[in-house]
Image (cartoon, grey):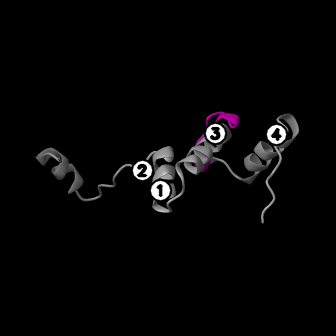
Amino acid sequence: MPTTEDIAVISKPGFTPPRPRLFDEVRRRLRVKHYSLRTEQAYLYWIRRYIQNNGRRHPRELGGKEIEHFLSDLAQRHRVAPVPSP
């Protein structure tokens, strides 16, 4: 339950709430779309692996070049093949 102090901070002009943490936001969006728990776990696994592969930088800081490098690395070094679309 919010305290009087919490309400005072929230009601100040210019207050912006903190952004949700990345994995919390991913979970929230997947659950809103009713994705299975297994799918959620798979998404989080690959996001975590992508972040680790890029020096633990936030995906917001990364672009197409890093995505291409990550996918190429998976295909070449780890023998991970893309799943064809139906």
Separation of residues labelled 3 and 4 (CA atoms): 14 Å
Separation of residues labelled 2 and 1 (CA atoms): 18 Å
Where residue 51 is drawn, which disc sits there? 3
Separation of residues labelled 2 and 4 (CA atoms): 31 Å
Of circles 2 and 1, the one toward us is: 1
Label 4: which secondary element: helix
Under mark 4, the amino acid is Asp
At 62% across and 45% down in the image, what residue appears? Answer: 42
Q: Circle 1 sits on which residue?
A: 31
Q: Quadrant of the C terminus?
A: bottom right
Of circles 3 and 1, the one toward us is: 1
Under mark 3, the amino acid is Ile
What span is in magenta?
A: 51-60
Label 3: which secondary element: helix
Where residue 19 is drawn, which disc sits there? 2
Separation of residues labelled 2 and 3 (CA atoms): 18 Å
Of circles 2 and 4, the one toward us is: 4
> What is the x, y in percent for residue 50?
67, 41
